[in-house]
Image: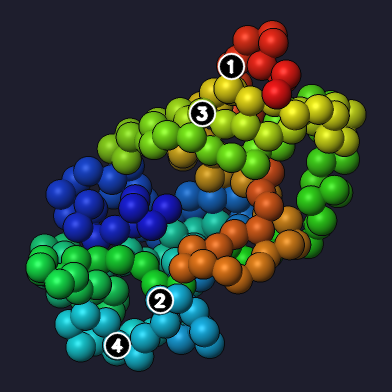
């Protein structure tokens, strides 16, 4: 989401969410927060790289996309006000970036989210970067555990999972196990309707 809601990408027309501001892009139970003031957050700061006050924002509120990540340049290109998301490097001009971004936790435990899954994949590792930010197409290698009748059954590896981020966003259900560790955090999430591919022997580690 952070890359698709980046004001520079939106201004260039290279984001699959470029026409989605104010619209429902995720399931109604999903909210995403960018909080530059979180205590001990890795990206916490009082102001951004251009001196603009950094403020807490609900980027997605109950499924609806409410804002872009804007610095002064991208805001000017889009004829909007900066959101205080300029990040400055040592040898490059400022560009938009999120701060402490996280998906708010849901109401169910991971075990409860799996309870009605007859067969599925519990992903513990993602491999590669097969994401097209223009179209939203998503395809990555994965490893984890096979789910059978609501429980983890056996480990699997060399699996490919694929879908389109627009569809995946609308199929997300977050669990209640959010823990803050990084600059971008999320609880366990369930995503229904994805495509999986892998050989018959790929459950053998």
Q: Residues within 10 Å of mark 2 (few under 14, many from 20)?
A: some
Q: Is residue 110 above or below residue 22?
A: above
Dot label at residue 141: 3
* Element at label 1: strand
Q: Earlier in the sequence, mark 2 or mark 3?
A: 2
Tell me the distance, in whole angstroms, between the alpha carbons under discs 3 and 1. Answer: 9 Å
Residue named by callout 2: 43
Residue 119 position, x and y percent, is: 79, 25
| Residue drawn at x 23%, y 87% as measured from the top left | 52
Residue 9 position, x and y percent, is: 22, 52
* Element at label 2: loop
Tell me the distance, in whole angstroms, between the alpha carbons under discs 1 and 4. Answer: 45 Å
Q: Kindly indicate whether the residue at mark 4 contacts the one at mark 3 (C-beta within 8 angstroms).
A: no
Residue 117, quarter of the rendered image: top right
Tell me the distance, in whole angstroms, between the alpha carbons under discs 3 and 4. Answer: 38 Å
Q: Earlier in the sequence, mark 3 or mark 1?
A: 3
Dot label at residue 47: 4
| Residue drawn at x 68%, y 44% as measured from the top left | 190
């Amino acid at each position: 989401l952070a890359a698709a809601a980046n004001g520079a990408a939106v201004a260039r027309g290279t984001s699959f969410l470029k026409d989605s501001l104010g619209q429902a892009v995720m399931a109604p139970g999903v909210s995403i927060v960018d909080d530059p003031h979180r205590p001990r957050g890795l990206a916490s700061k009082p102001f951004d790289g251009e001196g603009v006050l950094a403020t807490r924002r609900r980027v997605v509120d109950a499924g609806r996309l409410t804002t872009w990540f804007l610095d002064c340049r991208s805001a000017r290109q889009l004829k909007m006000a900066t959101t205080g998301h300029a990040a400055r490097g040592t040898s490059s001009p400022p560009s938009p970036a999120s701060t402490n971004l996280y998906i708010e936790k849901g109401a169910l435990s991971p075990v409860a989210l799996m309870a009605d899954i007859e067969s599925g994949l519990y992903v513990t590792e993602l491999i590669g970067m097969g994401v097209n930010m223009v179209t939203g197409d998503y395809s990555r290698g994965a490893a984890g555990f096979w789910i059978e009748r609501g429980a983890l059954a056996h480990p699997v590896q060399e699996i490919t999972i694929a879908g389109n981020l627009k569809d995946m966003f609308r199929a997300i259900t977050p669990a209640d196990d959010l823990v803050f560790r990084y600059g971008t955090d999320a609880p366990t999430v369930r995503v229904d309707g994805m495509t999986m591919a892998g050989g018959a022997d790929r459950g053998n580690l």
